[in-house]
């Protein structure tokens, strides 16, 4: 379970067993604020495997989202390399695959 201080918003990872069924008073080590933390009933009634899944899901939700996915960069680079390679090595492509000559001619890149 992740506790968040209501005063300074510091966050702490605490096992559910440490809070107990009735809850307990906790103190923030950063600002010394004291509050009563209630147990997290949603996770408390789950099996250990489900509890691990919920913890992982909470941790993933707390991570910042990437603003520009690496996948798009890789995709763009791949397209650039394929198109650029087809342009720069067009004589070699036509020598190995003569059927490509009409394709190059149709886009204005005649091969002698």
Image: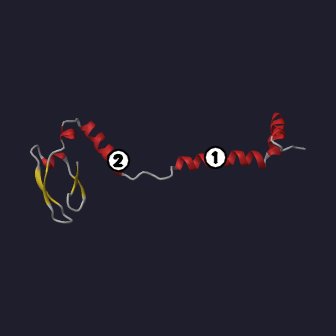
- The residue positioned 9% from the left and 45% from the top of the image is 22
- The label on residue 61 is 2
Q: Which residue is mark 1?
A: 78
Question: Left or right: where does residue 86 sit relative to residue 31?
Answer: right
- The residue positioned 67% from the left and 48% from the top of the image is 80
Where residue 94 appears, as percent x and y from the top left, is: 83, 40
Tell me the CA gap for discs 1 and 2: 31 Å
Question: Left or right: where does residue 104 sit relative to residue 20?
Answer: right
Question: Left or right: where does residue 62 sit relative to residue 38?
Answer: right
- The residue positioned 22% from the left and 40% from the top of the image is 43
Residue sitting nearer the eye, 33 or 98: 33
Most extreme residue toward the bottom is 31
In the picture, which quadrant includes the C terminus? top right
Q: Quadrant of residue 104?
A: top right
Q: Are marks 1 and 2 in contact (CB under 8 Å)?
A: no
Seen in the picture, residue 2 relative to 50 is either above or below; the reply is below
Q: Quadrant of residue 57?
A: top left
Sequence-first tag of 1 and 2 = 2
Question: Left or right: where does residue 110 sit relative to residue 2?
Answer: right
Where residue 40 appears, as percent x and y from the top left, is: 19, 43
């Amino acid at each position: 379970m992740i506790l968040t201080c209501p005063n300074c918003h510091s966050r702490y990872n605490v096992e559910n067993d440490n809070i107990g069924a009735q809850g307990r008073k906790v103190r923030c080590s950063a600002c010394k604020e004291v509050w009563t933390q209630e147990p997290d009933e949603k996770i408390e009634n789950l099996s250990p495997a489900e509890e691990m899944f919920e913890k992982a899901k909470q941790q993933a939700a707390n991570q910042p989202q990437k603003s520009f996915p690496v996948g798009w960069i890789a995709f763009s680079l791949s397209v650039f390399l394929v198109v650029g390679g087809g342009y720069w090595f067009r004589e070699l492509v036509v020598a190995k695959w003569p059927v490509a000559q009409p394709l190059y001619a149709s886009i204005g890149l005649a091969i002698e």
